[in-house]
Image (cartoon, grey):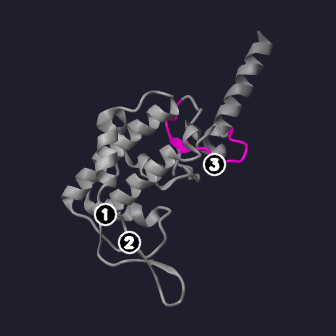
Amino acid sequence: MVSHDGKPYRFDPGALCLELLPTGGPGAFARFEVLHEPADLAAWAARSRLSEGLELAVSERELVRAREVRDALFLLTADRAHGRPQRPEHLDALNAAAAEAPLVSRLTPDGTRAWAPDATGTQLLSTVARDAIDLFTGPHAHRVRECGAHDCRLLFVDTSRPGRRRWCAMEHCGNREKVRAHRARGRLTES
């Protein structure tokens, strides 16, 4: 990712499904939209934690559906992070995507994993939706968080052993918030 001042930093949201969220979102987050054409979704998949070699064909209809599923997933994840009830319309969108056939992996003669040919955007969305269901029903479901910085809304799952991660990335928001707190303490002692 790239910070407001143009510095790159590493953001690991901890799950494939959460990697899709920074590509845009509902409401005010639409200004961050990067999925403008089918090739953009394929490029996102190539950068994701899916292993290399996925050859993906995405249609315009699948791109629209990807943004709809992403927006529903964004709102479900934010609700989960803040302990709010899950909204039925968002659950329906996620479950409908998960009901489709997922990406298919295969074993190669050299013992490595590869993707079956002719993968589609629908299969990609199913795989992402299934990952979200696994996250929300798995052992880290209670560790879905929103970055603790006052001006950051990135969502992640805290997979750290102690379970105390507060920031999207320590080298980005964590450092900024620690500097902000230090300056605030300095102003208090001056008063």
Q: Amino acid at mark 3?
A: Thr
Determine crowd level at label 2: few under 14, some 14-19, many 20+ residues with C-alpha closer than 10 A. some
Q: Residue at label 2?
A: 104
Side of 110 where 104 appears, left or right? left
* Residue at x 33% of width, y 38% of height: 90
Type of the residue with mark 1: Ala
- Amino acid at dot 2: Val
182 relative to 98 in the view: left or right = right
Which residue is drawn at the image coordinates 55% and 37% (left, top)?
Answer: 145
* Residue 152 inside the magenta-drawn segment: yes
Mark 1 — residue? 101
Helix, strand, or loop for circle 2? loop
> Where residue 62 sits in the image (x, y, percent)?
24, 58
**In this figure, which residue is indicated by the disc labeled 3?**
159
Q: Quadrant of the C terminus?
A: top right
For marks 3 and 1, give the one nearer the viewer: 1
Q: What's the CA distance linking mark 3 and mark 1?
A: 28 Å
Give the foreground label among 2 and 3.
2
In reply to whether residue 82 is colored magenta, the answer given is no
Q: Is residue 25 visible?
A: no
Q: Tell me the magenta residue range.
A: 151-164
Label 1 near label 2: C-beta < 8 Å? yes
Q: Answer whether labels 3 and 1 touch (C-beta < 8 Å).
A: no
